[in-house]
Image: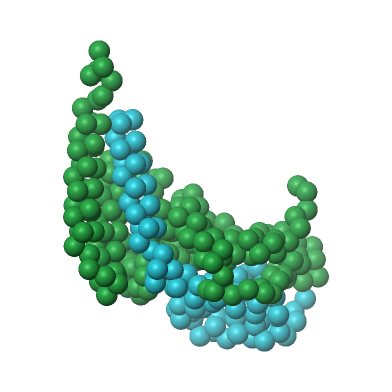
Chain colours: A cyan, B green
Amino acid sequence: MEVAGMTLSCQELVELVTEYLEGSMEPATRARFEQHLLVCDGCGLYLAQMRRTLRATGTLRERDVAPDSLDVLRQAFRSWKLRAARG
Amino acid sequence: MARSRVGGRASIADECAQEAWVVFLESLARWEGRSTLRTFLVGILLNVIRNKVRSEARSVPLSSVGPGSGDDVGPTVDPERFAPEAHAWPGHWVAPPQGWSVDPASARELRETLEETIAALPPAQRDVVTMRDVLGFDADETCNALGLGDTHQRVLLHRGRAKLRRAIESRLGLDPVRRPT
Ligand SMILES: [Zn+2]
């Protein structure tokens, strides 16, 4: 069954969201993607939530990143030592 | 004999780690403020990543760190949220996302959720998400810094981002009710 704007299923669309946001999508696929969005609230919401998530992740830089990076470092050194210790 | 418990390799690794810590702490002391945050963090992260890659290359079989392995494949959204093949509209939402009443950029607990989720990502996803979405580097810069191809970088970003969105959804209590399996 084919519904107008539904040549791409929702399940396929969610896996293309990053390609869409990156602007690396082929024009034909992009057209199908955008057509789907016109008729599907669920996918529109999914995309909108992904954008809000990215905006929120960008705000971590302002204040919270340094301690995080310290953890990254600690973990890296810890696993490095563990691996070396195991031989 | 206490000494025999410590292998030669562990001692060398200890020295390496300590040396890296000294370098790191010295650079932290030289860090003069936010204007250099980006440069500073990138230098540190890239060194850690390089070291990690080198140490993994020594101790982990290549097949388990290459692209397409482990967490790099499979759907990023629970397949149970979509209609099955037999349905009139296969692949259409049966449990679509619910609207968020709170903006994750302004709610402290959601920012914490993001931090925790990033920290818990598989390392390759974490490095890409950190460079792209936290530090704001573009795809080319990230590929170059981490030694990734375009497609692999995008796959790692896609999988990491999907987990961040899902973590917020879950924290807001908007997980769809799961059917027992
Ligand atoms: Zn849809």
Q: Is residue B146 above or below residue B57?
A: below
Provide residue B29's location: percent of width, then percent of height. 21, 59
Provide residue A65's location: percent of width, then percent of height. 38, 64
Tell me what residue is drawn at x 60 percent, y 70 percent: A14
Residue B19 visible in the current orientation: yes
Q: Is residue A4 above or below residue A66?
A: below
B149 or A68: which is nearer to us?
Answer: A68
A3 or B19: which is nearer to us?
Answer: B19
Residue B39 visible in the current orientation: no
Provide residue B156's location: percent of width, then percent of height. 45, 62
* Location of the N terminus of chain A (image quadrant): bottom right
* Location of the C terminus of chain A (image quadrant): top left
Would residue A74 be found to the left or right of residue B159 on screen?
left
Q: Quadrant of residue B43?
A: bottom left
Would residue A53 be found to the left or right of residue B172 on screen?
left
Tell me what residue is drawn at x 23 percent, y 59 percent: B28
Provide residue B97's location: percent of width, then percent of height. 69, 70
Tell me what residue is drawn at x 48 percent, y 60 percent: B115
